[in-house]
Image (tube, rainbow, N blue to C red):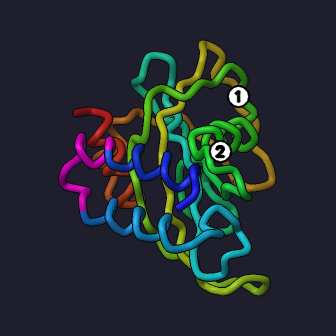
Amino acid sequence: MGESASSLIQALRRYRDQWQGDADVVAQFEDFAQTHADAFERGNPVAHFTGSAWLVSADGERVLLMHHRKLDRWLQPGGHADGDTDLARVALREAEEETGLAGLHVDGGIFDVDRHRIPARADEPEHWHYDLRYVVRASADESFVVNAESHALAWRPVNEVAADETLDTSLRRMARKWLA
């Protein structure tokens, strides 16, 4: 096992110790990291690691969501590691690129983990994302810019996200974690 997989596994175990109800999914993430040398590469056609941002306002009361163009759903900013083994850095980079916000910073270690299927499209087969989510906090300037990856961006009160049954279950789970 390489150094990058080793540090990721240590971070996953710290996360598992904090969120013991996620032990089964953490075991899947560990196994994937240990058995796939190309786990951080989009070129792995079966699955790969991604990094996402639970992007909260400076006061922590709201979260910035994007209406994802390809998936046609409200989701958190995030994307492919593309070889970068520092998934917190990936989450920060994706949050900056997908929102145009300046002055963002990662706040703590892994906040959430989610393994989800990505449907097949013309240029790629169906595959799995092993997504690690990090709290990314905005500065006082909350002016965002919609880019080509989304239809819209919106600041939403976290308590509303937690209760909105129309949203993705993982968004509601992160909102509940944040409120706890």
164 to 48, vertically: above or below: above
Distance between the Cα atoms at labels 1 and 2?
A: 15 Å
Q: Which residues are magenta?
A: 14-23
Magenta segment, principal secondary structure? helix
Residue 175 appears at what percent x and percent y?
34, 42
Q: Which residue is mark 1?
A: 101
* Other-residue count near label 2 (Cα within 10 Å), few / some / many at <14 / 14–19 / ≥20: many
Residue 152 appears at what percent x and percent y?
67, 48
> Which residue lies at the image location 67% right of the left edge and 86% below the top edge?
125
Describe the element under mark 2 as helix, strand or loop: helix
Numbered disc in front, either 1 or 2? 2
Residue 49 appears at what percent x and percent y?
57, 61
User: Which of the marked residues, 1 or 2, is nearer the chain's N terminus?
Assistant: 2
Quick check: is 16 in the magenta stretch? yes
Q: Which residue is mark 2?
A: 90
* Other-residue count near label 1 (Cα within 10 Å), few / some / many at <14 / 14–19 / ≥20: some
> Which residue lies at the image location 48% right of the left edge and 46% below the top edge?
133
